[in-house]
């Protein structure tokens, strides 16, 4: 694990430096898949000499940059519906699956010890549940010493696919959230402080005692943040893990005819993590040669990067889904030539 994290950091230095000559792929967008893209980039550079320059700026920024054709590909955790893809003249396919997890900083409460359900998370973020010893939270956590301390809510400040996944989960599981706030990459937050990127939220939660935030699982693990258990639609309390993310993905039916447009939140499986999602790649339809170069990288990652992904707490795409993506590329004339 330590070696892989070193690779992620090294790849960030390696691929963003303008002083290096040679072929470069430029991408921008979601912070959710940042650790695994950089780990893949490091190994890909070692094997091919081709560098990936990926700017972790949030899904909103990734969509904006590919719309403006300023990058070779955009990345978003919020999939674009087919009509938007037609409007912007974009292709779209998933690259990796992961989970968004609530994280807390409550002295004495370790990772996996606090249980929450959608109602608790919803009303914390609405500002209705103000203290950690709220009766509903206490009822979910008999035996856990919860202090009478005000909950400090942390959310994303930028346009974010992680936020889109998190708010889609809340809107699907909590009527009050759906009616008062809704879902999207950017929403009008009732309470809390905003951090930029998964990194910003993780840093805020790390610094603020009695806080709660939401981040992609890799950021929780790498920052040693205390993630919570969640009650899923089947009524079971589950921990975030490769296994519970896979359980959520098991019911996902990605359709190439819809450019793989799909949300994975609130999956019905008994062991499914309720805030799971895929991260998507966006490409300009008219840039055939560029897309082949980008897709050569992702084809390499699909065939060589599964273990790297799992070591960073992501779920690799199932073999059947990878085959669907290859056929999608072939049908659109963007299958890599090597």
Image (spheres, grey):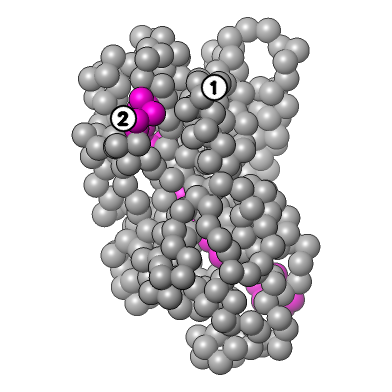
Q: Please tell me which residue is depicted at 71% across the width and 81% down the height of the picture.
A: 150
CA distance separating discs 1 and 2: 19 Å
Residue 69 is at least partly visible in this image: yes
The label nearer to you, 1 versus 2, is: 2
State the SS at label 2. Answer: helix
Q: In this view, does 209 lie to the left or right of 78?
A: right
Q: Is residue 273 left or right of residue 320?
A: right
Q: In this view, does 48 lie to the left or right of 246?
A: right
Tell me if mark 2 has few (under 14), some (14-19) or many (20+) residues whose alpha carbon lies within 10 angstroms of its own.
few
Query: Is 101 one of the magenta-colored residues?
Result: yes
User: Looking at this view, is 29 or 53 the one in front?
Assistant: 29
**Count of labels in the image:** 2
Q: Give the range drawn in magenta.
A: 85-111
State the SS at label 1. Answer: loop
Residue holding disc 1: 71
Q: Is residue 133 above or below residue 105?
A: below
Q: Please tell me which residue is depicted at 42% across the width and 37% down the height of the picture.
A: 280
Is the N terminus in the top left, top right, bottom left or bottom right quadrant? top right
Residue holding disc 2: 86
Q: Position of residue 104 (x, y in %)?
A: 65, 69
Q: Please tell me which residue is depicted at 43% across the width and 45% down the height of the picture.
A: 78
Q: Please tell me which residue is depicted at 49% across the width and 27% down the height of the picture.
A: 66
Q: Is residue 260 above or below residue 24?
A: below
Q: Where is residue 119 in the image (x, y as percent from the top left)?
A: 45, 78
Is the C terminus in the top left, top right, bottom left or bottom right quadrant? top left
Q: Determine the image quadrant of residue 34.
A: top right
Q: Position of residue 297 (x, y in %)?
A: 47, 21
Q: Considering only order in the chain, which callout, 2 or 1, is on the residue closer to the N terminus?
A: 1
Q: In this view, does 59 lie above or below 204?
A: above
Query: Is 219 one of the magenta-colored residues?
Result: no
């Amino acid at each position: 694990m330590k070696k892989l994290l070193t690779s992620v950091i090294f790849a960030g230095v390696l691929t963003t430096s303008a002083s290096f000559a040679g072929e470069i792929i430029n991408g921008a967008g979601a912070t959710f898949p940042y650790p695994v893209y950089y780990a893949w980039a490091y190994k890909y550079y070692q094997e091919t000499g081709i560098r990936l320059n990926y700017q972790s700026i949030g899904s909103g920024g990734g969509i904006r940059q590919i719309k403006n054709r300023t990058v070779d590909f955009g990345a978003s955790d919020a999939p674009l519906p087919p009509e938007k893809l037609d409007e912007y003249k974009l292709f779209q396919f998933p690259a990796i699956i992961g989970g968004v997890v609530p994280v807390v900083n409550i002295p004495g409460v370790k990772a996996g010890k606090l249980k929450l359900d959608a109602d608790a998370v919803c009303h914390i973020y609405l500002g209705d549940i103000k203290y950690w010893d709220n009766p509903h939270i206490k009822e979910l956590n008999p035996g856990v010493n919860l202090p009478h301390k005000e909950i400090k809510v942390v959310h994303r400040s930028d346009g974010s696919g992680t936020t889109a996944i998190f708010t889609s989960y809340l809107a699907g599981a909590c009527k009050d959230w759906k009616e008062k706030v809704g879902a999207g990459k950017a929403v009008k937050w009732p309470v809390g402080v905003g951090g930029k990127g998964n990194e910003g939220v993780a840093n805020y939660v790390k610094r603020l005692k009695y806080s709660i935030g939401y981040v992609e699982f890799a950021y929780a693990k790498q920052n040693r943040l205390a993630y919570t258990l969640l009650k899923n639609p089947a009524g079971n309390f589950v921990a975030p893990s490769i296994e519970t993310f896979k359980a959520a993905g098991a019911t996902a039916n990605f359709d190439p005819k819809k450019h793989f447009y799909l949300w994975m939140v609130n999956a019905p499986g008994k062991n499914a993590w309720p805030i799971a999602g895929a991260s998507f790649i966006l490409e300009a339809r008219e840039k055939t040669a560029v897309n082949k170069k980008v897709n050569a990288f992702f084809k390499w990652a699909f065939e060589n990067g599964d273990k790297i992904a799992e070591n960073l707490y992501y779920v690799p795409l199932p073999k059947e889904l990878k085959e669907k993506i290859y056929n999608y590329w072939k049908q659109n004339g963007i299958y890599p030539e090597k």
